[in-house]
Amino acid sequence: MKWYKKLHWQIIIGMILGLLWGLFASVFGLIDFTQDFIRPFGTIFIDLLKLIAVPLVLVSLVVGVASLNDVTKLSRMGGKTVAIYMVTTVFAITIGLTVVNILNPGGTLPDETRATLIESYSENVEGRDEAAAALQDRSFLEFFVDIVPENFFEAASDNTNMLQVVFIALLLGIGLINIPAQKGQALINVFESLNDVIIKVVDLIMKTAPYGVFALMAAVIVDLTGDDLGQALILLKALGWYCIAVLIGLLLHVFIVYSTLFKLFSKMKLRDFFKAIQPAILLGFSTSSSLATLPVTMERVEKNLGVKEEVSSFVLPVGATINMDGTSLYQAVAAVFIAQALGMDLTIAQQITIVLTATAASIGAAGVPGAGIIMLVIVLQSVQVPIEGIALILGVDRILDMARTAVNITGDAAVSVAVAHTEGKLGELHFDDE
Ligand code: ASP
């Protein structure tokens, strides 16, 4: 197949063209045109993916659990998954803290830039403050209460309730394991063929990905630059070190933690891994949503990385909701950056508090755009850094959201490989797009 016919290249080309269009539109006054006639295609593309997310998780998890034939296998896999997720998250935060302490990006921000940034974004902070307060009022056990839905349709009606959908699918799957095989077979057949249909639909949606990604990128760029490209560049320059700190942290995390994970738990090479799941990572980057990307992540992990469905259908949906290595790393960098910019020195004890709260905050953050910055409020409050400081970083948050979402997805996929290998459920690698 010619290189440009491969899906990931087409997505990359779509992204680059979208970026160029966004810049062109900002300079030549085509912002309204972009908002009215280009953005909607991006929105339709994301909505199609979101539409498929709940049925996909439900159906593939039921099929996966039913094929395990044994509840102890399920609980062993569950324990392992959550443990690896927690460990990688703590590493991510530690890397974030190390990088931000060494680079000290907050110390380099000129006083007047700091004042202007705070002034221009402070209004936007309020809503996030309230959203975080509502979340913070909940007790620890409420997390578990929230996982158990009281109504099936209510759970299935909101994509951010993915853990509830996972719970329902687990119950159904466990029920199926525990009735005589001939009785369950009819339902398993239905779920299996539904599963095949859904996978085909994801394939079809992905054929439009290059266009969807073009529209999404163009929309992000015009949002970012507004009609003043110069202003956006000044903002990027002022916050450049902060952005670089987050990006370096993310890269270090991917190359150190995931390659170690592969060395310990599977023989997969990081390079092969990336080659196989590229479209999912690119899509995470352009949609800024791990939930919207979930159908594609599942497809890639199963078809290309060779992870068997009974593992991927459990590990990935759970990961998309509770495992956010990119987000937690970013929260650590952002919290310390804000403290540095406001002239506060954080003690070691405070930095340890950041590790704990950022782990919890990333579990609580939904896999949707901008979720990480809402949960950042909780991290800041835990170390008594004024939350108004968020105003400093709001302007560049969208770009960092894209990068951290790509890492969130990479983390879920990497852990699914590790779990699959230890369970003897890792098949052959495939690099093709079909
Ligand atoms: N956008 C991220 C995700 O979907 C969450 C965040 O960090 O805002 O994974």
Image: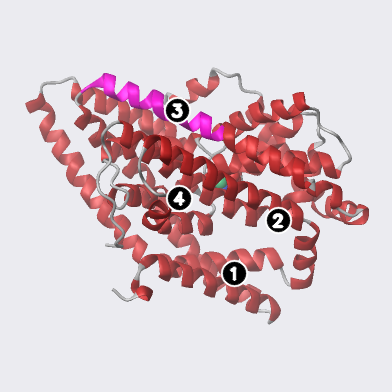
Write down the residue under mark 4.
Answer: 292
Mark 3 or mark 2, which is nearer the start of the sequence? 3
Residue 19 within the magenta-colored segment of the rendering: no
Q: Quadrant of residue 181?
A: top left
Write down the residue under mark 2.
Answer: 396
Reply above or below: 222 against 392. below
Q: Are marks 1 and 4 in contact (CB under 8 Å)?
A: no
Q: Position of residue 170 (x, y in %)?
A: 31, 27
Mark 1 to mark 4: distance in Å?
21 Å
Where the N terminus falls, by quadrant? bottom left
Residue at horizontal 61 percent and vertical 22 percent from the top: 138
Q: Are marks 2 and 1 in contact (CB under 8 Å)?
A: no
Q: Position of residue 2 (x, y in %)?
A: 32, 76
Write down the residue under mark 1.
Answer: 35
* The residue at label 4 has a CB less than 8 Å from ligand 1: yes
Q: Are marks 1 and 3 in contact (CB under 8 Å)?
A: no
Mark 2 to mark 3: distance in Å?
31 Å
Q: Nearer the viewer, mark 1 or mark 4?
A: 4
Mark 1 to mark 3: distance in Å?
41 Å
Write down the residue under mark 3.
Answer: 82
Q: Nearer the viewer, mark 4 or mark 3?
A: 3
Task: Please name whichever residue, 310 or 268, is drawn nearer the observer in this view of the structure.
Answer: 268
Identified by mark 1, the residue type is Gln
Identified by mark 4, the residue type is Ala
**Residue numbers of the magenta segment:** 70-89
